Image (spheres, grey):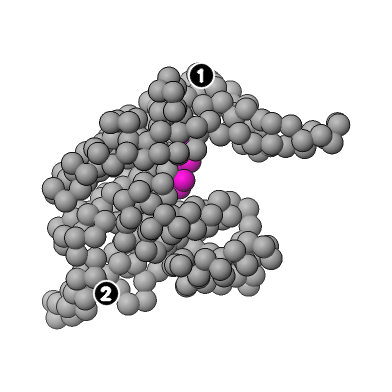
Amino acid sequence: MTDTQISPLDQARILSEALPHMQEYDDETIVIKYGGHAMGAEDTAKAFARDIVLLEQTAINPVVVHGGGPQIATMLKRLGIQSEFAAGLRITDAATIEIVEMVLAGSVNKQLVGYINEAGGKAVGLSGKDGNMVKASKTTRTMIDPGSNIEKAIDLGFVGEPEKVDLTLLNQLIGYELIPVLAPLATSKDGGQTLNINADTFAGAVAGALKAKRLLLLTDVPGVLDKSKKLIPELSVKDARKLIADGTISGGMIPKVETCIYALEQGVQGVVIIDGKTQHAVLLELFTDQGTGTLIHK
């Protein structure tokens, strides 16, 4: 037996200790956002897929929302499509949204579906456009013009914010041994445009509509860190807002935490930001006493 193996007795003990956690989540819905950066190498993605199948086998109802930013950037570069930016944000024009949809609803979605099915699950790949699941409005941002010092609106193109989630289609899948795998695309309110949604925001809207037991945001950082760069295991919404106000939570972590707060306000019981590159991160969070990452709750 090598150093990396554990004895059958230890395996049995681990399973026994996981039982109360399995009972807690029995027949509950868990929404897992799997980021493009967290996907990593093929073996990492396949390990994630196995964990998702294990959740379904233990009577949990997993719903997976995936990103795909790195994959989109790679395809745009391969096709020679130059991206424009304003205030640090990518402008998604008509040519870009075609590639975004091709990558998200196509290659990334179907690859993840394939991994889950290979592991013994029954995954169904969809986007927010299917069944009018998610309707969205165009995102607008403002910036201060450096020349005139006047605030002006920025048109980010085919980028949206969720406005309405219709659960008709998801309710036909959840609880029937099927695992929805969702690409964060939506239809505009008038039905005429495809809009790209930030995957965290999309997952928060879906989790809120489902009143999920947990929303897990798998990212490329351990969780929310304090000013000493140490992990904060647990936060209330009040504490989280204080940390945003005093600058402890900053940069790209702010919209993640704001998504957590929104999901909690919509009825999700708890949201966890965890490092998707950690082996078996989902299982560690759900089935062990110590968990992993940062839990945010009401």
- The residue closer to the viewer here, 71 or 251, is 251
- The residue closer to the viewer here, 196 or 278, is 196
Q: Distance between the residues labelled 2 and 1?
A: 54 Å
Q: Check disc 1 and give the amino acid type.
A: Ala
Label tally = 2
Q: What stretch is highlighted in magenta?
A: 197-201
Confirm whether residue 56 shows in the render: yes
Q: Check disc 2 and give the amino acid type.
A: Asp
Residue 233: mark? none
Residue at 81% over, 34% down: 150
x, y percentage for residue 241? 59, 64
In the image, residue 194 sits, relative to residue 133, either above or below, namely above
Left or right: 1, with 83 as reference point: left
Whether the magenta-drawn stretch holds residue 169 is answered as no
Secondary structure of the residue carrying tag 1 is helix
Residue 94: mark? 1
Residue 3: mark? 2
Q: Residues within 10 Å of mark 2 (few under 14, many from 20)?
A: few
Confirm whether residue 231 shows in the render: no
x, y percentage for residue 7? 17, 78
Q: Disc 2, disc 1: CB below 8 Å?
A: no
Left or right: 60, with 67 as reference point: left
Residue at 29% over, 30% down: 130
Quadrant location, the N terminus? bottom left
Which quadrant of the view contains residue 71?
Answer: top left
Residue at 40% over, 39% down: 164
Tell which circle, 2 or 1, labels the residue nearer the N-terminal end.
2
Residue at 29% over, 53% down: 48
